[in-house]
Image (spheres, helix red, strand yellow):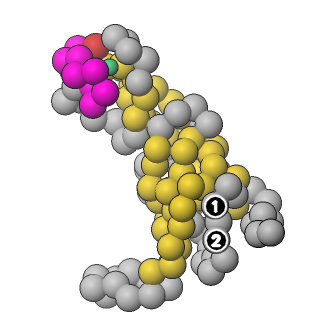
Amino acid sequence: MNETLIGVECRACGYRAHPYQSYGCESCGATADRLIEVALSGSGTVTSSAVVHQQTERSAEVPFTVVAVVLDDGPFVRGVLSSVADASLRDAKVYARFDHEANDFRFALRDEVPSRA
Ligand SMILES: [Zn+2]
């Protein structure tokens, strides 16, 4: 099982992104031969979150929380939280947890959700 987020790094400009793709750099436009696969930490900070209460796909259990995360090593990643959290998760620290199939992960909260002033 893959326990690491696999992303892509551009050898021309250093830009990192997730998920891995081999089309070319989305930042500087370098061709695919300048891209390398890179292991990402999976740790990051939530920039926004939302609870999904309805889903057209019946296999998906609701509610669930989607989060937008800036990883500590650069890339912006959207994912699903391992728990449901109604409060704002902005600035919460999370990490990628792999309890599913390869490269299928959920973000988990590192600590309590920061209280809002
Ligand atoms: Zn680039």
The number of callouts visible is 2
Residue 98 in view of the camera: no
Residue 112 position in % (x across, y down): 80, 66
* Residue drawn 40% across the image and 40% down it: 18
Where's ligand 1: which quadrant? Answer: top left
Residue 27 percent location from the top left of the image: 31, 27
SS under mark 2? loop
Q: Residue at the location (38% across, 29% down)?
A: 8
106 on left or right of 60:
right
Instruction: Tell me the amino acid under the disc marked 2.
Output: Ser
Contact, mark 2 vs mark 1 (Cβ under 8 Å)? yes
Q: Is residue 112 above or below residue 4?
A: below
Q: Which residues are magenta?
A: 25-33
Disc 2 residue crowd, few under 14, some 14–19, many 20+, Cα 10 Å: some
Q: Considering depth in this image, is 63 or 86 the residue closer to the camera?
A: 86
Residue drawn at point x = 37 percent, y = 42 percent:
19
Q: Which residue is the site of mark 2?
A: 88
Mark 1: which amino acid? Arg
Q: Position of residue 80 (x, y in %)?
A: 50, 65
